[in-house]
Image (tube, grey):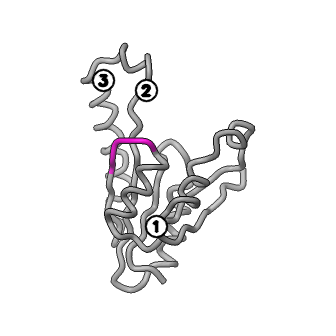
Amino acid sequence: MYKKIIVPMALDHGLGEATLNVARVLLSKGGTITALHVHEAPQGSASAYLDKTVVQEAFDRAKATLDARVAGMSGVTGMIVKGHSGRSIIDVASQEEADCIVIGSHKPGMIDYFLGSTAARVVRHAPCAVHVLRNPT
């Protein structure tokens, strides 16, 4: 059992509840679960065309969505950070001294075979145990 579990959540995918349920099963009595969303700001030339207020509004909407998802969940706190998803999940796990990450994944597509998925990066580089919950679709 684990005392500090990080559950990365892509707010536009449907695995959030399932990964939180797995985390609850793995959680030691008195432990904590952090529902983490990594907000990736637009990169490259796209960022040149976006006003900073538009980017901030997108971040604020993501934070509100995460807060709404975890509202009323006992022992679960929400956290949102800016950055690259794989790297940020690993960084937060290190900073928070997490002993487990429960992450959702999907069936790999062709691009995943060349670039790798976020879950694959987390499994390879995490400073703690990682449980991967695969989406059946």
The label number, if any, that marks residue 54 in the structure image: 3
Q: Nearer the viewer, residue 75 or 98?
A: 98
Q: Position of residue 106 (x, y in %)?
A: 66, 50
Label 2 – label 1 distance at C-alpha? 27 Å
The label number, if any, that marks residue 43 in the structure image: 2
Where disc 1 sits, the SS reads: loop
- In the image as oriented, which residue stretches furthest toward the top? 49
**Foreground label between 2 and 1:** 1
Q: Name the residue tied to disc 1.
A: 127
**Mark sitting earlier along the chain (3/2):** 2
Please give left or right for residue 89 compared with residue 103 in the image.
left
Q: Position of residue 51 (x, y in %)?
A: 29, 18
Please give the name of the residue rendered at 26% of the width and 23% of the height, measured from the top-left corner: 52
Q: Nearer the viewer, residue 36 or 130?
A: 130
Q: Which residues are magenta?
A: 80-84
**Mark sitting earlier along the chain (2/1):** 2
Q: Position of residue 49 (x, y in %)?
A: 37, 13
Please give the name of the residue rendered at 71% of the width and 55% of the height, measured from the top-left corner: 136
Three-letter residue code for mark 1? Pro
Magenta stretch, main secondary structure class: strand
Q: Is residue 53 above or below residue 111?
A: above
Label 3 – label 1 distance at C-alpha? 35 Å
- In the image as oriented, which residue stretches furthest toward the right? 110
